[in-house]
Amino acid sequence: MKAETNFDSDYRPAEDEPFMNERQLAYFKAKLLAWKAAILTDSRGTIEGMQEGTRNIPDIADRASEETDRALELRTRDRQRKVVAKIDAALRRIEDGSYGYCEETGEPISLKRLDARPIATLSLEAQERHERREKVHRDD
């Protein structure tokens, strides 16, 4: 499936066109690739900053503060690593033709939801049901 064709930067998916047509697929693919590139660029900056930032700080409070900042940065990078895996999964779904459809119901996921969260795998209704079930089980 060629998702690169018929794409221009001013295009926005609309409800009045066929769902997941070539232009929509190209739009979401470009959006996902740009997001992934931004995350990877940030990660490289973090690694370089941590390598350069290693120094001996004599004040215990300053050292603790720096270590806390580093731990927070590493946690953020770990979350972003997981997002990259979800982006890769979404790109695979574009290629196999299943992108944009709810994994639970098989119904189309709204274009607004996909535009806001292009890695979404569930429709809004299915996501809400999932979160309610999660909350019920968590309270046990």
Image (spheres, rainbow, N blue to C red):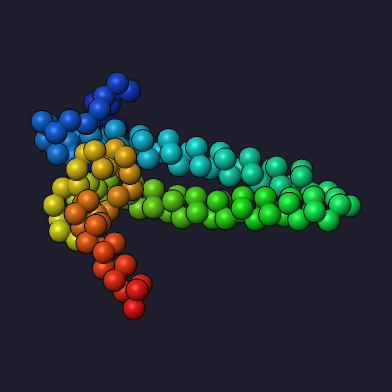
What percent of the width, then of the height, locates residue 84? 45, 49
Query: Which residue appears farthest toward the right when viewing the image?
Result: 58
Do we see residue 131 in this rendering? Answer: yes
Instruction: Please state the horizontal and vertical placement of residue 109, each as a whole percent of the image.
Output: 20, 47
Q: Residue at x 57, y 40 (%)?
A: 42
Image quarter (top left, top right, bottom left or bottom right) of the C terminus: bottom left
* Residue 92 located left or right of residue 14: right
Task: Relative to 71, say whether 135 is above or below.
Answer: below
Q: How many marks do you count on the picture?
A: 0
Q: Closer to the camera, 43 or 75?
A: 75
Q: Residue at x 26, y 24 (%)?
A: 11
Residue 74 coordinates in the image, percent (x, y): 61, 54
Q: Residue at x 14, y 39 (%)?
A: 19
Which one is in front, 24 or 1?
24
In this picture, residue 90 sits left or right of residue 78: left
From this viewpoint, which residue is outermost toward the front? 139
Q: Is residue 126 left or right of residue 68?
A: left
Look at 61% across and 53% down and name the residue there: 72
Q: x and y percent of residue 24 in the render?
A: 23, 34
* Picture quadrant where residue 18 is located: top left
Q: Is residue 108 above or below residue 112?
A: below
Regarding residue 2, the answer to whether it shows in the image is: no
Nearer to us in this view, 68 or 15: 68
- Residue found farthest to the bottom: 140
Q: Give 22 or 19, whichever is nearer the viewer.
A: 19
Hey, which quadrant is residue 94 in on the image? top left
Quarter of the image that includes the N terminus: top left
